[in-house]
Image (cartoon, rainbow, N blue to C red):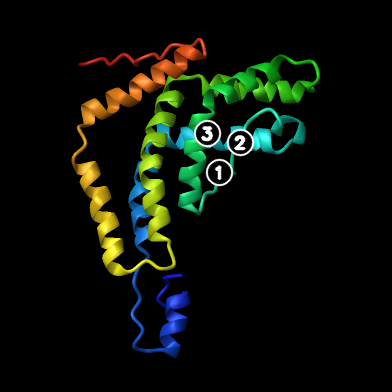
Amino acid sequence: MSGIHNGVQAIIKNEFSKAVFVHCSSHRLNLVINDLNKLQHIQNCAGIIKSIIKFFRLSPKRRKRIEKIPLFCETRWSEKYKTIRIFSEHFVGIVKQLEIISMETCFDSQTKIQAFQLHSAATKSNFIVCLFIMAKFSAQLEPITNALQAIQLDLIQARKYITEIIEVFNNLDAKNYFHEIFKKAQNVANELGEEIEIPRIVFN
């Protein structure tokens, strides 16, 4: 899209030399969010979410077991935010269905093994905490991303949306904000009969 030689902007500029290329505000926001995805735990969490959704959606029989959750789209960030938010809202039911499938005789052994492995991954402390961190930020970024992709958006509105989200994040009390997320993760883990384990830190 933005390539200076073969991108769409280059093709348009060849035809209309006075055209000015303006980088998509939504895409620039997503490039910033990409830095978060460089964290290994976040990468792992996203990969597990994608695998679980794929597991249910690939089979009509399994798909009936959970609420309709959209595919985990790698390129459309507005859809990714939506998927993470919906997944977190139905997380308890999804995990319970994985456990049920892993034990039901109506499924073949390969399916039961896969369900067991996904259930084990989804009930680990790191995954649960990362899921609700991602869900919390996704809920805040989803409306902004959708607004920045609106057809009628102008520069003043775009600046207003970006300024608002920056102000929200700048005013966050990180300690209290994480405590709220961690409490949510603990409650969900307890509902699943699991316990959030805090890693031991060794100081030299």
Could you tell me which residue is drawn at 26 percent across and 66 percent down? 156
Please report whichever mark, 2 or 1, sits nearer to the chain's N-terminal start: 2
What residue sits right under mark 2 in the picture?
Answer: 53
Q: Which residue is painted at 78% across and 22% down in the image?
A: 107
The reply to whether the C-beta atoms of the residues labelled 2 and 1 are less than 8 Å apart is: yes
* N-term-proximal mark, 3 vs 1: 1
Measure the C-alpha gap from mark 2 to mark 1: 7 Å
Quadrant in the picture for residue 204? top left
- Residue 10 drawn at (x, y percent): 43, 80
Residue 152 vs 88, above or below: the answer is below
| Closer-to-camera residue (114/60) | 60
Q: Tell me the amino acid under the disc marked 3.
A: Phe
In the image shown, does 9 or 4 lie closer to the viewer? 9
Query: Can you say whether 140 is above or below 117 in the image?
Result: below
Mark 1: secondary structure: loop
Q: Identity of the amino acid at label 2?
A: Ile
- In the rendered structure, the answer to whether residue 30 lies left or right of residue 65 reads left
What number of labels is visible?
3
Badge 2 density bin: few <14, some 14–19, many ≥20, Cα 10 Å:
many
Horizontal arrangement in the rendering, residue 99 relative to residue 80 (left or right)? right
Residue 31 x, y percent position in the rendering:
36, 54
> What amino acid is labelled 1 in the image?
Phe
Q: Please indicate whether residue 157 sits to the left or right of residue 98 in the image.
A: left
Label 1: which residue?
72
Q: Residues within 10 Å of mark 3 (few under 14, many from 20)?
A: many
Mark linked to residue 87? 3
Mark 2 to mark 3: distance in Å? 9 Å
